[in-house]
Amino acid sequence: MIRAIIVEDDPMVAQINRHYLQSFQSIRVDGIFNNGRDALKYVKAHKVDLMIIDLAMPVMAGTELVRETRKARINSDIIVVTAANDVNHLSEMLKYGIIDYLVKPFDSDRFSQAIQKYLNKANILSVKETLKQEDIDALMSMHSTTARDTRKGIQQATLEKIISYIKKSGNQSYTCESLSEELSLSRVTIRRYLNYLVETNVMFNSIDYSTGGRPSIIYMPK
């Protein structure tokens, strides 16, 4: 389970962000903070995977929270949600390795793209101990894959279901037929998601000609 917190001084925006996050089954919102000081105290004492941070807040601004978080060597991933659309704020936040930068007002689709980008990164890192150059290239280009994945019809809940099964089963190879039976999903759906995992360098495929009949496509985690 991914542990997330929201740092936002506008209660309505905070609840909207909570609602958006809770639509992802693998994410749990562990806290909402209306200033950076309280959020910093929390992340120093608790494991936090993802932080949704507004920049303009009382007591301690989000910019300072991001700086202090990195100074404390806390590597939580960060998505900035702010009304600040100037180059200086964006440039500074990019230096701290943020996942995305959303300018208010934004819609649910744009928020979902940001979360999808984070989850794509988390999925690759969670199934691999070492990375090849193509894996690193995929991670570095996540900003350009998010919208494309949405057009392909990739749904996060289904993707998480398939990845979770692959990680837990311990098998070395899979076919569309075997996963379809185990997960009660159509072969067409399974094939689309497995091909997506191949494209994002989480898995690779090969053709098995030893079946005695029609060749079978085998999918294997990298």
Image (cartoon, rainbow, N blue to C red):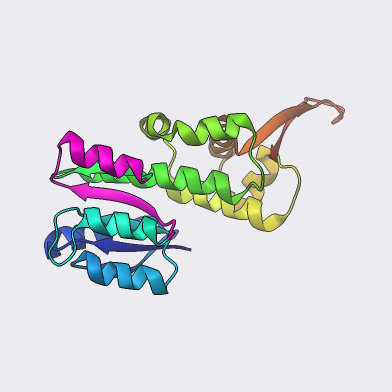
* Residue lying at 41% horizontally and 46% vertically, measured from the top left: 118
Figure quadrant of residue 92:
top left
Who is closer to the viewer here, 40 or 164?
40
Query: Does the magenta run of residues contain 66?
Result: no
Q: From the viewer's perspective, is residue 81 above or below residue 209?
A: below
Q: Picture coordinates of residue 201 (x, y %)?
A: 59, 34
Q: Picture coordinates of residue 179 (x, y %)?
A: 65, 46
Q: Picture coordinates of residue 14 (x, y %)?
A: 19, 61
Who is closer to the viewer here, 181 or 112?
112
Figure quadrant of residue 99:
top left
Who is closer to the viewer here, 190 or 221?
221
Q: Picture coordinates of residue 158 (x, y %)?
A: 49, 48
Query: Does the magenta run of residues contain 78?
Result: yes
Q: From the viewer's perspective, is residue 2 above or below residue 161?
A: below
Please indicate, yes or no, whether residue 184 appears anywhere in the rendered image: no
Figure quadrant of residue 190:
top right
Task: Answer left or right for 107 relative to 169.
Answer: left
The number of callouts visible is 0
* Residue lying at 12% horizontally and 64% vertically, measured from the top left: 58
* Residue lying at 56% horizontally and 44% vertically, measured from the top left: 124
Magenta-tinted stretch: 73-96
Task: Answer left or right for 222 relative to 54.
Answer: right
Task: Answer left or right for 59 relative to 171.
Answer: left
* Residue lying at 33% horizontally and 58% vertically, measured from the top left: 51
